[in-house]
Structures are given as structure tokens and as C-alpha cells.
Image (cartoon, rainbow, N blue to C red):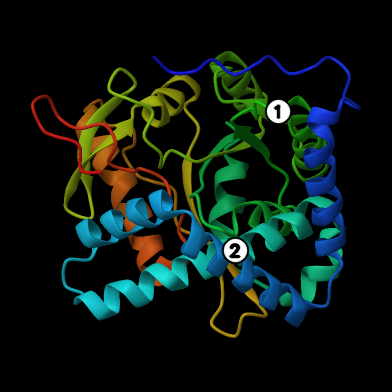
């Protein structure tokens, strides 16, 4: 039987929260480091996690073996290390997105396909943005706010101190941070004409999902994307974002809204979304959150892949 965690104390000054406060202070400091130092610290953090968290390394290795079978062992191991380094840098990118005015990054951003979002907004039905769990996720949200307003759907953090810090930061970047369980809130905001950023690329279990191919592997893919689109009639906008090879600039890009979506076929709709996500990941595979058990839920009768 799993050990039950003790409930968090009511006082946010309780000693149990001191490590959380220390982490928040470190993120605030990290946000203002010189850029080259951020990269160095981030890569070092990623290397530390790579060497110490063997379970996460195993998950990453498994995901990349499944998704990139064409790579040999040496190439795959190199990609594993780059993934940990990129996600370590992502901690500093997140700190920057949460703690600094995004205006200081405007000169580093190239935003392509803005005409697609302008066209979608002109329909007056609100917009559902398909985001992806890249290491650049929260900095990408901050950079996006320089050009377009949007709300965001997110998962609440269990730690109430970090939850308050994170939500306050996201409410500064986005119009509103909406809990992922608040479907009514998402639909209400879209119907009011807002754009809502939603990332459907994680495993939420069998009941909420259908199995659709992702890098050629059946993956439990959430049905909610098509459900929201159907309930609101809003155009669904795929959004790509990544740190460029120079490690200094960023590219955001809107693709045209998905035509004929939703189709009414859950598997076909999930397959289309996964195909876009796969396309975006292949541009910079090391920046994706491969540390997550993307293939955790398996079709009936199949053993765990991890």
C-alpha cells in the first residue's frame, strides 16, 4: 500500500515550506542571471539530474528508443543527454518567464504565422490553441503574450506555496490560469471570445483517452481537445515554439487552423493532433519533456513499456 503523504501545514511559514521558499528565491535569482550563465547553470542542472535520477533517465531512454528506432545506441544516448540538458535550461527559462517582464526578450523572438491567428480571431468564436510540453513551455507563454492575449489550462501543484507562486506568475503572463478539471471555465472563456492555450500531449489514463499513433506507437490521447472544439465551435490553432540552435533566440509559429476538426471520429481527431505534435517535436526533439511516461497507459493486455 502506498504511503500517504502528510497534509501540508496551514501556515506558509512552516519549516516544511522552507525548501520551497528557497527554490522560489533561487528561481527569482536565476531569472536575472546573464544569459550565458543561465545556459551553463541549466546544463549543469540537467547533467546532475541525468546522473542522479536513474528512474527518469530510464523513462527518457525508453521513450526515445520507442520514438526514434532509426537511431543507433550512441546517437540515442547523445539525444538522452541533450534532453536532460535542455530540460535543465528549461528550469531557468521558466524562471525567466515567471519572474521577468517579457519585454526584455522581444528582440530575441521570431513569430511566424501570426496571420493564421489573426484570421482565427476574426471569426469571433474564440480560439483553442494546441500547445506542447516543451522545456520552453512557460517562457514560450511569456513570449506569446508580447503578440497575443491568451488564457492557459494548467495542472494545480500539490504544494500550496509553489502553487500560489506559479499561478500568480501565470496570471501575469496569461489572461487567466484555468484548472485542467474546469471544463466549464474553459468553454466559458472561449465562448466569450478568448484564446485558450491547452496542451493535450500527456497521458491522462484510459477513461479520458483513445489510443492513437504517436511516433508510430499507440499512445493514450485525451479526447477533450475535440470535445472542447465541438462545444465551442472555435478554430483549433497549432502552435510551435522552441529555442533556436544559437541558444539565444526563440521561434514561435502558428500553423493554419485544423480544417474539418473535430470530425466526430475520436481516433481520427486524436491522430491529427498527435501528428502535429510529432511534427513540432522533430524540429527540436531534445527540448521535449521525454521525462514524462507518455506511453504509461497501454491497450488492454499489453505489458508496461517502462
Residue 290 makes an appearance in the image: no
The residue lying toward the viewer, choosing from 64 and 102, is 64
Residue at 51%, 47% (x, y): give it. 131
Q: Residues within 10 Å of mark 1 (few under 14, many from 20)?
A: few
Could you say where residue 96 lies in the image, as x and y percent from the top left?
78, 60
Can you say whether 25 is above or below 295 in the image? below
Residue 90 in sight here: yes
Contact, mark 1 vs mark 2 (Cβ under 8 Å): no
For residue 263, what is the image quadrant? top left
Q: Dot 2 lies on which element?
A: helix
Tell me the quarter of the picture where residue 295 sits: top left
Q: Is residue 256 left or right of residue 74?
A: right
Q: Is residue 216 above or below residue 83?
A: above
Residue at x 76%, y 56% (from the top left corner)? 95
Q: What x and y, as percent, mark residue 195?
A: 63, 38
Label 1: element kind: loop
Please name the residue that numbered disc 1 is placed on: 159
Q: Nearer the viewer, residue 50 or 175?
A: 50
Instruction: State which quarter of the image contains the N terminus.
Output: top left
Residue pictured at 31% horizontal, 34% vertical: 221
Q: Quadrant of the C terminus?
A: top left
| Residue, disc 2 | 88
> For this view, does 7 lie left or right of residue 113?
right
Q: CA distance from mark 1 to mark 2?
A: 21 Å
> Residue 235 in the image: x percent, y percent?
48, 38
- Tell which residue pokes out farthest to the left in this image: 301
Q: Residue furthest bottom?
A: 246
Amino acid at each position: 500500500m502506498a504511503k500517504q503523504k502528510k497534509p501540508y501545514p496551514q501556515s506558509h511559514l512552516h519549516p516544511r515550506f522552507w525548501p520551497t521558499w528557497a527554490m522560489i528565491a533561487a528561481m527569482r535569482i536565476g531569472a536575472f542571471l546573464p544569459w550565458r550563465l543561465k545556459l551553463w547553470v541549466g546544463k549543469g542542472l540537467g547533467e546532475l539530474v541525468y546522473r542522479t535520477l536513474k528512474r527518469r533517465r530510464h523513462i527518457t531512454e525508453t521513450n526515445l528508443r520507442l520514438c526514434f528506432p532509426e537511431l543507433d545506441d550512441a546517437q540515442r544516448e547523445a539525444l538522452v543527454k541533450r534532453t536532460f540538458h535542455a530540460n535543465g535550461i528549461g528550469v531557468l527559462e521558466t524562471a525567466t518567464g515567471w519572474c521577468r517582464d517579457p519585454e526584455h526578450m522581444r528582440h530575441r523572438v521570431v513569430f511566424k504565422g501570426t496571420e493564421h491567428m489573426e484570421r482565427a480571431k476574426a471569426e469571433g468564436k474564440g480560439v483553442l490553441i494546441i500547445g506542447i510540453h516543451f522545456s520552453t513551455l512557460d517562457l514560450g507563454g511569456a513570449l506569446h503574450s508580447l503578440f497575443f492575449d491568451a488564457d492557459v489550462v494548467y495542472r494545480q501543484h500539490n504544494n500550496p506555496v509553489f502553487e500560489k507562486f506559479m499561478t500568480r506568475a501565470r496570471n501575469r503572463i496569461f489572461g487567466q490560469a484555468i484548472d485542467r478539471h474546469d471544463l466549464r471555465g474553459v468553454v466559458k472563456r472561449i465562448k466569450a471570445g478568448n484564446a485558450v492555450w491547452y496542451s493535450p500531449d500527456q497521458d491522462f489514463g484510459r477513461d479520458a483517452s483513445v489510443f492513437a499513433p504517436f511516433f508510430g506507437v499507440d499512445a493514450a490521447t485525451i479526447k477533450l481537445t475535440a470535445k472542447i472544439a465541438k462545444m465551442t465551435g472555435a478554430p483549433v490553432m497549432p502552435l510551435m515554439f522552441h529555442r533556436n540552435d544559437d541558444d539565444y533566440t526563440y521561434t514561435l509559429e502558428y500553423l493554419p487552423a485544423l480544417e474539418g476538426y473535430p470530425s466526430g471520429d475520436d481516433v481520427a481527431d486524436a491522430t491529427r493532433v498527435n501528428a502535429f505534435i510529432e511534427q513540432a517535436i522533430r524540429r527540436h526533439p531534445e527540448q521535449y519533456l521525454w521525462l514524462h511516461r507518455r506511453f504509461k497507459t497501454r491497450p488492454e493486455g499489453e505489458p508496461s513499456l517502462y
